[in-house]
Amino acid sequence: MHKFWRRSRGYGLTLIGIAILLVLLFPLVWVVLSSFQPTADFYAPVASLIPQTFTLENYSSISSQIGPLLTTLVIAIFTAALSLAIGIPAAYALAVFRWRWVAIAMFLILITQVVPGVMVATPLFLTFSRLGLLNSIVGLVIANSAAGVPFTILLLTAFMSGIPGSLREAAHLDGAGEWRTLFSVIVPTTRSAIVAAALFSFLFAWGDFLWALTLNTNGTITPLSLSIFQFVGNFQTNWGGIMATSTIALVPAMILLVGAQRYISVGLTAGAIKD
Amino acid sequence: MRPRRSSYQRRAALMRLLFIVPVAVFLALVFGYPIGFNLWLTFQSFDLVSMISGVSEFVGLDNITAVLADPNFASAARNTAIFTVASIAIQFVIGMALALFFYNVFPLSKAIRALLVLPWLVPSIVATTAWRFIFKDPSGFANQLLGVVGIPPVHWLTSSDTALVSVIIINIWIGIAFNLVLLHSGLQSVPVDRYEAAQLDGAGYWQRFRHVTLPALGPVIAVLLVLGFVYTLKQFDLIWTLTQGGPGNSSQLLSTWSYTLSFNSNAFGQGAAVADFLFLASAIIIVVYTLVQRKQSNA
């Protein structure tokens, strides 16, 4: 009898949990659901929670979004790659080389997290315009890596400081230099944290709006965020198309949730790592 | 005196520097230089012409005084204060309630908690697109919900009375996940025996929360509030994509105003001055936090 009550209390909590989930995720769930309803239904006097008619026409109406989608994919992949290329050696150095100024360096990296994007926007815009980096993939990758690089370092330094020194010493005794130690011993042991850093860097770039807005002036390059923004701003609004595009824009976050679940809390708290 | 190093050791030390040369160059390019540039801009008469010619003049504190004298400054500062304090306070309370709820282990609790992080991970433009529809006037879901309890439709994003409240609601929605995750992981480290001891002393749920949970969560709460402050102060996407500060500056924050000054009015110096204020506020908070923390860990 006791067990029965305990178990039913558990399921009761599950029901409450699911209710909380539905309320909080409602806006996103609705984006997905409504992407399958005809555009005309968006103009109904009373919007319905669940689509009345199911259609895939919205997804076939967004061929114009394929370009922005691919642009963003390329930018996000290269942002993740650049963040790792710069961040991994830096994290290793800060975690294991006993430099006197490591604490100061970590503090400066932490400070980058508080720099308002709008503060960097003007200088970067003016500088990039001089360097010919406006309206270019390279410029956007650099700007987006400004979020990915510090994040990668904060996350990986924490993980790499946790690796026993004996592992590194053993590699040194085998004659491996620092670079080989890093790539053959340290990287494999922190592989999962590295994957998490890459996924988050990817996601920052994927969701970026500020750089897409600021560093593109002539329409040659339109990342997804900017494309949806312009899509929404147009007078003749194709709501079905907007929701279909938004649904596609949700996919990476969902993949991250499923694929790298246990690193999300690590990732969320990486900004909070102090020493 | 330091011992003399052999040339081999010196070379090894130089080789080690190679690990951080790329990051130093990169951070100098995307943070160091822009921050310096921004500071320089603050004291320059930099406009559209200067953009092409590269020529601008030193104008002393003109940009700063112009910004401070602008009536928009007071309203943007006030809106930023309301936006920041309301967002942090409410998302903290909701995050705490959810963290306590998910402290219970029940079937699917981990999976549900994981999914709750989604609003924080999705592109901001998707979040604002969804909310634009919820706040649609007059037929959106928010107004439908109000209709159920007999309240007439609200103009949400399109009225100067409610635009700020609307973007605060959305910002809270985005920030709950961050609070939930940090507080939940903080709760895991509260020693269970302290709860048991308090229970033996006859402490009720609220008393246990006040006298055991809250003090134990102190450091986590401090981090949360500091980061919450900094992240909320930086918020830009949300307002820009929904209201662009309007209608009539009613939802204008310092961040969006800075951007408007630079990119819509080409008053780059004034935009830079406003951005300086934002950075200064965040930097002060971080430095104070770091000092307090160092003092506590030394004590």
Image: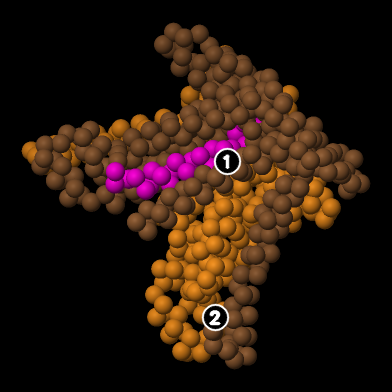
Which quadrant holds residue A149?
A: bottom right
Residue at image mark 2: A178
Chain for disc number 1? B
Which quadrant holds residue B69?
A: top right
Q: Is residue B43 left or right of residue B19?
A: right
Q: Is residue B36 left or right of residue B99?
A: right
Residue A155: in magenta span: no
Give the image location of residue B63, x and y in percent.
76, 36
Q: Tell me, what hue is chain B?
A: brown
Measured in 3D between alpha carbons, the distance from the residue under mark 2 to the one under mark 1, in whole angstroms, is: 40 Å
Secondary structure of the residue carrying tag 1 is: helix
Taking the spot 44% from the left edge, 41% from the top edge, the residue there is: B225
Q: Tell me, what hue is chain A?
A: orange
Give the image location of residue A134, x and y in percent.
79, 49
Q: Amino acid at mark 2?
A: Glu
Q: Amino acid at mark 1?
A: Ala
Give the image location of residue A138, x and y in percent.
74, 56
Disc 1 crowd, CA 10 A, few/some/many (<14, 14-19, 20+): some
Residue B53 vs residue B171, the one in the foreground: B53
* Residue range of the region highlighted in magenta in the rendering: B215-243
Secondary structure of the residue carrying tag 2 is: helix
Residue at image mark 1: B281
